[in-house]
Image (cartoon, grey):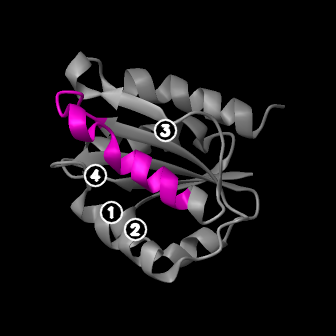
Amino acid sequence: MAFKFLYGSQSGTAEVLALDMEELVSEAYSSDCLSLEESDISDLTDTKDVIFVFVMATYGEGEYTDSAKHFFAEMERVLPDLSAVRYAMFGLCDSSYEDTFNFASLNANKLLTKLGAKRIGDIGVHDADTGELPEDIGIPWMEEIVHIAYPD
C-alpha cells in the first residue's frame, strides 16, 4: 500500500501542498513525492498497490505549469495503457480566470481517463480567489482519499 505524489508547480504552492499531503500519509503508508519534471510516464507502470496523487497548478491561461508540460505532452505522444493505474487529482487554480478555471487538473484527468486510469474520489480544488489556504482544503481532501483507497 503506497502513495506516489506527482506535482506540477509554477510558484511552489503545488509542491508544498504535495509535500504536506505526503507527510500526512508517510507514517502509515509507503510514499514518495516528485515533481512531474523529474518524472517519466514509465513511472506510472509501477502500479502494484500504488495510488498516484496528482497535485496540479493551472498556469497562465489554463496551461500546465512548466514543470508538467513535458510529462503530459509525452503522455499524449505515447498514449500508454494506464488501465492498471489508480489515481487522485487535486487542482490549484484561481476562479478570477473563469474561462480557464482549473484547466490543468481537468485536462490531466481527462487524459488519464482516456488512457484507462481509474480515478478515486472527487477532483479536489483549491481556489486561490477564496483566500483560504491550500492546505486547509487539500489536507481534508487527502484524508478522504486515504479513506477511499484503504478503508480499513
Question: Badge 1, how many Cα within 10 Å: few under 14, some, many 20+?
Answer: many
Q: Are marks 1 and 4 in contact (CB under 8 Å)?
A: no
| Residue 110 position within the rendered picture, expressed as x and y whole percent measured from the top left | 50, 53
Give the spatial CA distance, label 1 vs label 4: 8 Å
Give the spatial CA distance, label 2 vs label 3: 22 Å
| Residue 2 position within the rendered picture, expressed as x and y whole percent measured from the top left | 68, 53
> Magenta region, mostly helix, strand or loop?
helix
97 lies left or right of 2: left
In the image, what residue type sits under mark 4? Answer: Ser
Question: Badge 2, how many Cα within 10 Å: few under 14, some, many 20+?
Answer: some
Give the spatial CA distance, label 3 vs label 1: 19 Å
Counting residues from the start of the chain, the first of labels 3 and 4 encountered is 4
| Residue 50 drawn in magenta | no
Q: Are marks 3 and 4 in contact (CB under 8 Å)?
A: no
Counting residues from the start of the chain, the first of labels 4 and 2 encountered is 4
- Name the residue beneath numbered marker 3: 21
- Name the residue beneath numbered marker 1: 68
Circle nearer the viewer, 2 or 1: 2
**Snapshot quadrant of residue 127:** top left
Q: Where residue 72 is drawn, which disc sits there?
A: 2
Circle nearer the viewer, 4 or 2: 2
Question: Badge 3, how many Cα within 10 Å: few under 14, some, many 20+?
Answer: many
Q: Nearer the viewer, residue 95 or 55?
A: 95
Q: Which residues are magenta?
A: 93-112
**Residue at (60, 66) in percent of width and height:** 115
Circle nearer the viewer, 3 or 1: 1
Q: Are marks 2 and 1 in contact (CB under 8 Å)?
A: yes
Q: Where residue 9 is drawn, which disc sits there?
A: 4
Q: Nearer the viewer, residue 61 or 67?
A: 61
Counting residues from the start of the chain, the first of labels 1 and 4 encountered is 4
**Picture layout, residue 110 above or below residue 139:** below
